[in-house]
Amino acid sequence: MRIPNFQMERMQSTWENLVEFDMSESGVRPMTLRGLVEMGLGLDNALDMPLGYSQSNGTLPLRERLAAIYPGSTVDHIEVTNGTSEANYLVALSLLEPGDEMAMEIPNYMQLWGVPQSLQASVRTFRLRPECNWEPDWDEFERAVNPRTRLLYLSNPNNPSGAVLSDEAMRRIVRRCEETNTTLLADEVYLGAELEGERTKSFWGMSEKVVVTSGLSKAYGIPGVRIGWMIGPRSLVATCWSQHDYLTIGPNKLSDMVARVAVAPANREKLYARTRAILSDNLPIIAGWAAGFGDLLEFNQPRAGAMTLVRYRSSIPSIDLCERIRTEQSTLVVPGSHVGLEGYLRIWYGGRPEYITEGLRRIGVVLRGVRST
């Protein structure tokens, strides 16, 4: 079966380098190589390193540092991938067969909406309800995660709302997966990107049915090296490694070197603190901007992540509204329909303040036109 177009990624890859302002981003402004050198990346070592193949499932030193982040794990529980997306893909590819069912929360990063379809598996969804602090609709959840469900995919902190599941919700989700013999795939790439308060609790260690994916792209602010990872049962990780051999084989050597520096305990905390500072400084900018539209916009206060959902009160479809913003203001925004929630815009606020301010101004020009009509 042909894989359907990943609408959001196709839109971004088509336009993000052609518009004047890209407000469709999803992480904080990236770290530089110079900044990583200041954190201990040996530039001379990198210059002298032969650019051969790296260990295909991640070098032992990198997997040792990752295992230290996840209590109870060993290097055999971990595989390093080319970004979190590849980790998610490998898990789905390893578990789903024709006729299987997969459950998925909405709104979400919609990668695993399309992948199961290419594997001839069906997808059942359940909503996170904004009126209930983005907790799951439990009736829908119980129907979506049933004895036929092979895999459940969720993101926590959630992409795109920035919401974080309560401890009780996490326990309830894990309990249901154990009852139905469903593997829980928890995408935790935004863990560490909280604006305030305690760090998000990981699903890791809550059950033998849990596999966690993450990477350097979001909370760490290093998307360009394309390093992600999975932490899961040894048998599943071994199967994913076998699938990896047929795809990209392994991460590149320079990226593995950068990752070893980034995930070192002291550097990880520095990078998380940098992310929090950027987001905390910028949140008032977008919140104040949204408040200026009165009842036209409803601003969603995120707890984590570099983008948020803004609900607009108009009958215009979100994809049409975003196309107007792109063509009239050379500014790219993600329509809510691309994350499974019509009537919303997903707007980035993880860049430099002056960039975010101008991008929001341009979006506002079109929104005021919507209001006037």
Image (cartoon, rainbow, N blue to C red):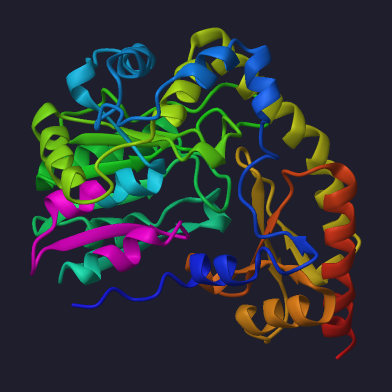
In the image, which residues are magenta? 90-115
Q: Residue at x 24, y 16 (%)?
A: 73
Viewer-proximal residue, 246 or 306?
246
Quarter-wise, where is residue 172 in the image? Answer: top left
Can residue 218 be seen from the camera position used here? Answer: no
Image quadrant holding the N terminus, namely bottom left
Looking at the image, residue 72 sits to the left or right of residue 350; the answer is left
Residue 59 in the image: above or below residue 296: above
Can residue 174 be seen from the camera position used here? Answer: yes
Q: Position of residue 126 (x, y in %)?
A: 35, 61
Q: Position of residue 204 (x, y in %)?
A: 30, 26
Viewer-proximal residue, 1 or 124?
1
Q: Position of residue 196 (x, y in %)?
A: 67, 27
Residue 241 in the image: above or below residue 126: above
Q: Residue at x 63, y 20 (%)?
A: 36
| Residue 32 lies within the magenta run | no
Residue 86 in the image: above or below residue 250: below
Residue 101 in the image: above or below residue 168: below
Quarter-wise, where is residue 21 in the image? Answer: bottom right
Q: Residue at x 18, y 54 (%)?
A: 93
Q: Position of residue 218 (x, y in %)?
A: 56, 38
Looking at the image, residue 144 sits to the left or right of residue 331; the answer is left
